[in-house]
């Protein structure tokens, strides 16, 4: 997403890209089903609890929708993270000058889904980790690929997983995903929340985001949940 005014231009670019290579996302460079599980994953927790993960992977409309259909995820919020500013708004972040990236805050039950499983979804389905400061038709540092960790264990697991994927040459290009501590997460405006659910027929959603849900369902059925989290 650039600005709402620039959506038409982004849509035009998306249409052209789709005509050439199909839906944008990780499937352009890797078979989602071939993306392995994280070797450094600690596995499922012994008891139910709540944990939080924050990811940035392009427009948060699609990223939010993908994680809402992952087993064990309790809530997903679209928002902004990664910048130094102590506040964030769509208009400010869209300038690309705040340092923030469009992100999602994923609340999950680690006894049902592990952090390593969430990383697998992030790299295999939610976005293309080889695109630098862009994602599909959306260009700028606010659309960069990033993992904002909340614990040292998350940092270790994320870095180890990236190294694992690079060693296995899962992607045809280098992974450019940033791994950084979470300094703050700022929820996006209400009209951005669950945008795919409320606008399933919007051309941008049909071209860029609905295919990701199909990829998740077909490639990672063990992690897919038909009903989305609320």
Image (tube, helix red, strand yellow):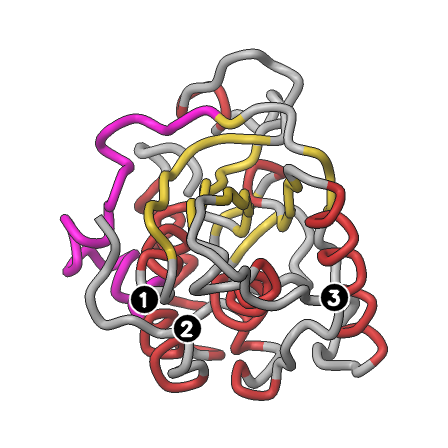
Q: Closer to the camera: disc 1 or disc 3?
A: 3
Whole-Å distance between the Cαs marked 1 and 3?
Answer: 29 Å
Residue 225 vs 89, above or below: the answer is below
**Which mark, by number, is residue 226?**
none
Q: Main secondary structure of the magenta part?
A: helix
The residue most toward the top is 86
Q: Circle 3 sits on which residue?
A: 161
Q: Image quadrant of residue 225? A: bottom left
- 10 Å neighbourhood of mark 2: few (<14), some, or many (≥20)? many
Residue 196 lies in the magenta stretch: yes
Residue 212 percent location from the top left of the image: 38, 70
154 or 90, nearer to the observer: 154
Q: Closer to the camera: disc 2 or disc 3?
A: 3
Looking at the image, is mark 1 or mark 3 earlier in the sequence?
3
Q: What secondary structure is marked by label 1?
A: helix
Looking at the image, is mark 1 or mark 2 earlier in the sequence?
2
Q: Circle 1 sits on which residue?
A: 207
Q: Is there a contact, CB below 8 Å, between mark 1 and mark 2?
A: yes
Whole-Å distance between the Cαs marked 2 and 3?
Answer: 25 Å
Q: In the displayed structure, does residue 48 sit left or right of residue 176? A: left
Q: Circle 2 sits on which residue?
A: 23
Tell me what residue is drawn at x 15 percent, y 60 percent.
201
Residue 100 percent location from the top left of the image: 58, 28
The boundaries of the magenta stretch are: 186-210
């Amino acid at each position: 997403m650039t600005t709402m005014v620039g959506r038409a231009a982004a849509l035009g670019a998306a249409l052209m890209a789709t005509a050439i290579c199909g839906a944008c996302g990780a499937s352009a460079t890797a078979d989602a089903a071939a993306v392995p599980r994280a070797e450094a994953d600690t596995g499922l927790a012994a008891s139910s609890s709540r944990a939080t993960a924050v990811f940035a992977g392009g427009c948060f409309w699609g990223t939010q929708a993908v994680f809402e259909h992952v087993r064990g995820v309790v809530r997903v919020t679209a928002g902004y993270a990664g910048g130094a500013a102590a506040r964030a708004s769509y208009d400010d972040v869209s300038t690309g000058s705040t340092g923030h990236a469009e992100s999602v805050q994923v609340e999950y039950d680690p006894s049902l889904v592990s952090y390593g499983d969430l990383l697998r979804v992030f790299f295999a389905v939610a976005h293309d980790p080889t695109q630098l400061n862009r994602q599909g038709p959306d260009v700028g540092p606010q659309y960069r690929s990033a993992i904002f960790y909340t614990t040292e264990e998350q940092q270790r697991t994320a870095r180890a997983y990236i190294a694992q994927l690079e060693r296995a040459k899962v992607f045809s290009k280098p992974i450019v995903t940033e791994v950084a501590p979470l300094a703050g997460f700022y929820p996006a405006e209400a009209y951005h929340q669950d945008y795919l659910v409320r606008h399933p027929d919007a051309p941008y959603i049909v071209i860029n985001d609905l295919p990701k849900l199909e990829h998740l369902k077909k490639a990672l059925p063990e992690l897919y949940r038909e009903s989305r989290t609320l």
